[in-house]
Amino acid sequence: MDSYIDLKNIPTKELKYVDLDRVNVNCSPPDFEPQRQYYFMAKCRQIVKLESERLGRPLYACIQVFGCQMNARDSEKLSGILEIIGYQLSEDENADFVIFNTCTVRDNANQKVYGRLGHLNSLKKNNPHMKIALCGCMMQEPSAIEKIRKSYRFVDLIFGTHNIYKFAELLTAMFESQEMVVDIWEDTDQIVEDLPVERKYPFKSGINIMFGCNNFCSYCIVPYVRGRERSRNLEDILGEIRKLVSEGVVEVMLLGQNVNSYGRNLARPITFANLLREVEKIEGLERIRFMTSHPKDLSDELIQVMKESKKICRHLHLPLQSGSTRILEAMNRRYTKEQYLDLARKIREEIPDIAITTDIIVGFPGEKPEDVEETIDVIRQVKYDNAFTFIYSKRTGTPAASMENQVPENIVKEGFDKVLKVVQDTARNRVALLQGQVQNALAEEVNQQDSSLITGRLSNNTIVHFKGDESLIGKIVPVYLKECHGFYYLGEIRDAGCVQSTPLQ
Ligand code: 5AD
Ligand code: SF4
């Protein structure tokens, strides 16, 4: 027993160096985090090893992500734990362990999960030792849990957004139980740091800077499923980014439902603009992105920091939702059409080469054709570089769901098509303005349709495809933007040293 490690004595920062095969899992688990989770990782490692020996092959795990960048980042955390406990990660759902990280922001996201669960059931019938787990935002809804308990009894594990850090502990419970394991918390104020993460891309990464949302837009379920706003400590964020940069990351995306209110609830409050100033100082980091900004909290200080920065990308996602002040009020967005337009104007004046993108909802209760016209007017004035247009989806439990004046489907569809057309026309014109320029692109992947091409991303988020090979991936290279094809470019790589960026007007 001498060579056994007791995790209770290991400092947090050293946990990642511990040989988990030497951890004593016969003693009780530590009652503090993240040591406790490393104990359960060691335990799961033994279980996976035994099962793999029994089958005479490695065990495969597959994570399917639905929804936003937050879920993508959470899935990287789940992947990190799965790798440590001995699973091989696979894209194929016909695996030994399948996890759906779900979304519930609109009803079609829920329907997709139910549909895909039917398919998993047929796979499980051929492979009875297959395990299935569900997590993410949809699991925070009691009605979804009820339905799964009743109609999808083959699911083995369900957990939510607040206890994702407990994944290893929940897995242990799943392996040791014959019944469906369900663990959902209503909320949490806890943030557990220093757990393993397996990144999808070696050269770029999302970083959570905060969790939850306090805004309660009247249509939105996020505050109910992601809980109250909690910011991570500045030093934890900077430490994580420094580590990522030392591993080869050149671009980070700072993630939060409302990044502009970062830091307000910290013991030593700090603004988002100041966080950006600190991130900018990290040597070796080339690009900084962030998502999402709420217009009501976007400060002049932030605009100045973006303007002066060499690293913050020329892209701002600024959800409009509606261009009608009356609808914005009913949505509880806390800005008017004019305030939004003033803000967009100020941003374009200060940072002329910035791309502004947005989210728009059509069909919010009480919306009339003249409100849709107000939205179209804002699109025409701001000239978005891209916009995600959504049909309003009724989310049970939100104030808008019980509003009486829901809009009939055919009227919504009419408004939606109109908005989409204007959005596409303006976006196409914006993207075309880059024609003939040479701009830096981060080479991200080999093009899926044509393997002689590399797909890269400009600072302003526009996609460009250019001739090149895999050795370029992760590098920032100057690219001549030769042909505009609607929303992307075909380009040619140019010698370093000839980069220019002409302001977009
Ligand atoms: N219906 C339609 N779209 C919604 N969004 C959030 N809630 C809903 C809903 N109930 C959209 C908003 C938000 C984006 C992430 O999803 O536009 O900005
Ligand atoms: Fe939802 Fe509004 Fe919070 Fe965004 S800011 S997550 S739309 S409540």
Image (cartoon, rainbow, N blue to C red):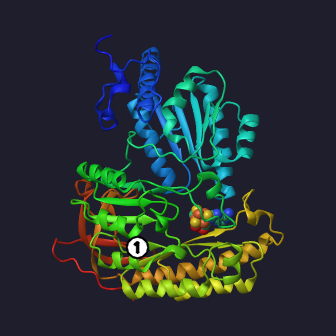
Asked whether residue 338 is in view, the answer is yes
Point out residue 485 in the picture as x, y percentages from the top left corner. 42, 75
**The residue tagged with tag 1: helix, strand or loop?**
strand
- The one nearer the camera, 344 or 426, is 344
Location of residue 308 by image quarter: bottom left
Residue 357 falls left or right of residue 444:
right
Asked whether residue 466 is in view, the answer is no
Check the image and name the residue furthest to the top.
1
- Judged from the image, the quadrant occupied by ligand 2 is bottom right
Q: What's the residue at 42%, 26% (across, down)?
A: 39
Point out residue 88 in the picture as x, y percentages from the top left corner. 41, 32
User: Can you identify the residue that label 1 sits on?
Assistant: 315
- The one nearer the camera, 479 or 274, is 274
Location of residue 145 by image quarter: top right
Q: What's the residue at 67%, 51% (across, down)?
A: 110
Point out residue 126 in the picture as x, y percentages from the top left corner. 61, 26
